[in-house]
Image (cartoon, coloured by chain):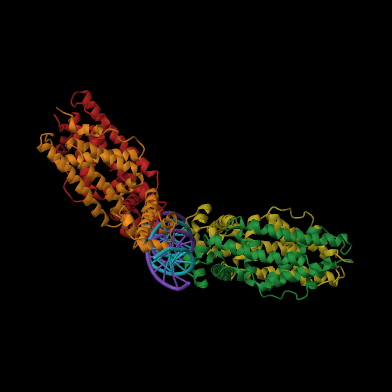
Chain colours: A orange, B red, C green, D yellow, E purple, F cyan
DNA sequence: GATGAATGAGACTTCATTCAT
DNA sequence: GATGAATGAAGTCTCATTCAT
């Protein structure tokens, strides 16, 4: 809707940029950054190679833009989830569900997302990572805040550092999602299956 | 000790192979598979390129050998930890500690390990991954067994699926280790800091 | 003439391809397939290596294209010669002359041609050879037909198998041409010098 | 028998050298000079690479020795044939038969022989060729001499230059042998099938 | 004297990037 | 502004040759 108010030329450019990123995402997530050529991306997006370079300084730049935008969407969805819900319990449920939702809706991204957050592409070049990690950290801090709130309000017991609990919940979601990615088992439909692990301790 | 009994020539070859893998590990973990050339590895290992190819059929082969051997060490250590300890609680403590120990002693590997298990190198080629993931799954199943035992013996309460709890514990360790890798904060000295999250539920 | 009607871009590409093949021919015929590098060909043709690969999938492909096109020209010229001339005698004269003409005009090719038909490049890879040999066989069969016609019409005596006579005539031309290639002596100006051997038997 | 009189050490060396050349011949004729490595030859001959270099200065040297020795055998056999037989007719028959015999008994060599005499390995490096061609020329001159004798003695008519007739006969044998090599048809059992072409002219 | 591990130059090929049209 | 042909640096891998044992 915002786009409609832009000059036609500008709107066109945004659509083109979007098509390029979409093509790149499909290819990167399928074959990995290093196994995709600019030629390939250009062909899939139905542009000339030169045009790609009008939008992105180089391959790495294109990659960063891609990751960055996807990360934006993810983190925005997660932050929203954490801000929605009557009490902290509801917020956590929303978080778990939102994380599942957004990831499963964008399987292609997830592969890249994990790649970015867990590993190999420390590499591609620094810089990107730190930016993404910062946003991960923000989500984590927000999650921590929910736990702190819950503890302060007496909803949760203070059995461990709130940050640690936040870390635990998030990493558990990731583990489930990762398994889902591999086709091992589905992501739990009810968030409670994941949350139970934390709510009801193993020992009295 | 076994090596001492081998013919000198054989011992020499083992040492050379080790040096090559060490050089490769250092470079791969720093810059990523695709950003390291065989030339580079050869130079770091102080061999000629051709010599590398006497030991490994090609770059991918070298990479697989590297990952495979490191994964062996890791998984062996973890399996050992899970088999050591008077009761299930002790076994879990050992697991958490062993995981921390072995990873922190091999920071370079961990980067590659995560890369393998979380992402990017879906790519490099299938085949390796599945092999490694299978071994991860074995560890996870062993961890699940500890929880099942503990639940059956009344040590733990059955508040969630044992496999889910196992997944939760393992992924939490990974999360901590990952943060440590990034220099954010140390891996907890006492395993209890991690275990507490599970033992004492957040709600009554 | 056809080329003139093509779009400028297309004409340009044809010229480039031609230049590349010309450079390759010169080098291959001088030093042999294995002793010429793509770098060398590129330099001689005044292109970058990468450009070569835009036109030919790989070195072998370039080689095959080269051989194939030259063989086309040769065989077409020979077939034409055999179809031109009042009687069989004239056709044979034309053949001998055409063979000499076309070969001597393309000395570089001839080296490769012989290489293809007599030897070494059994090797380079099958496939090409058989294709070329088939075309040689066609020419030979056509030559045989001329002899058969001549024998049936009473122009020639049936002193031997027509195919054998065809083989004999062709191989004699080759022998002369080969000697000429080596600078030993000239290819006979008059085709009769070669033909005489066959027409007038050594014995009564 | 001569070998028996040599010191044991010397006899041993000759046998080793022979084994190396045999291995090389088998491999070269199957795959071509450039597609065979010294390693391969060494393995087939059951020696170490280094040992090969004790006997031959380098790969080319080994190749030249191989070709040279085989050519010796061939040309000796041909020269013998041409010197054996009551009259010129018998000598020619012997020649045609000997050429067929010696080639078919050494199919592997023939491939290399043709490669040497007709093409590609102009290349490998000059030097060898000229030496071989000289010996070919000697045979040809000897063959010419037979025709001259035959003409002078009235056995043959002087229908063409004796050298040309010699060339014709030899190249016809080669053509038949080449076809046989390719499995197209057998080399004529009776030399007369080849000789007839020359003896009884096509025209009165 | 034989061995074969080690060497490293050099071959083929790809692909990010530029720039004339 | 878009195009895509051209570029050439750089990567992987092979193999003739050497030399310490």
Which residue corresponds to the image point at 60% horizontal and 57% vertical from the top-left? Answer: D29
Which residue corresponds to the image point at 72% horizontal and 56% vertical from the top-left? Answer: D101
Q: Quadrant of residue B23?
A: bottom left
Residue D80, above or below A201: below
Q: Could you tell whether A71 is left or right of E13 in the image?
A: left
Q: Could you tell whether C5 is left or right of C90 in the image?
A: left
Q: Tell me where residue C139 appears, x and y as whole percent.
A: 73, 61
| Along the line of sight, the residue nearer the viewer: A149 or C44 | A149
Name of the residue lying farthest toward the front: A5
Q: Quadrant of residue A12?
A: bottom left
| Along the line of sight, the residue nearer the viewer: D21 or C40 | C40
Q: Quadrant of residue D199?
A: bottom right
Q: Can residue C148 be seen at all in this image of the molecule?
A: yes
Which corner quadrant holds the C terminus of chain A?
top left
Q: Tell me where residue A10 appears, x and y as whole percent.
A: 34, 60
Name of the residue lying farthest toward the top: B153
Q: Can residue A161 be seen at all in this image of the molecule?
A: no
Q: Tell me where residue D168 appears, x and y as whole percent.
A: 76, 67
| Along the line of sight, the residue nearer the viewer: F3 or A128 | F3
Q: Tell me where residue A136 appears, x and y as whole percent.
A: 23, 48
Residue D170, above or below A117: below
Q: Could you tell whether B36 is left or right of A196 in the image?
A: right
Residue D177, above or below A75: below
Q: Could you tell whether B198 is left or right of C199 in the image?
A: left
């Amino acid at each position: 809707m915002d786009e409609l108010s832009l000059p036609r030329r500008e709107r066109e450019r945004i659509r083109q940029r979007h098509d390029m990123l979409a093509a790149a995402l499909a290819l990167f997530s399928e074959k990995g950054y290093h196994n995709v050529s600019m030629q390939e991306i250009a062909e899939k997006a139905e542009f000339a190679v030169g045009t790609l370079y009008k939008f992105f300084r180089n391959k790495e730049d294109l990659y960063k833009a891609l990751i960055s935008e996807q990360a934006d969407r993810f983190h925005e969805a997660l932050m929203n989830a954490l801000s929605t819900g009557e009490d902290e319990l509801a917020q956590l449920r929303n978080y778990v569900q939102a994380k599942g939702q957004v990831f499963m809706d964008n399987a292609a991204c997830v592969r890249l997302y994990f790649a970015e957050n867990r590993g190999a592409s420390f590499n591609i070049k620094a810089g990107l990572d730190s930016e993404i990690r910062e946003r991960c950290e923000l989500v984590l801090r927000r999650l921590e805040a929910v736990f702190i709130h819950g503890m302060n309000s007496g909803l949760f017991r203070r059995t461990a550092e709130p940050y640690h609990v936040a870390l635990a919940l998030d990493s558990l979601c990731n583990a489930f999602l990762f398994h889902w990615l591999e086709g091992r088992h589905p992501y739990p439909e009810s968030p409670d299956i994941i949350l139970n692990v934390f709510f009801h301790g193993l020992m009295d």
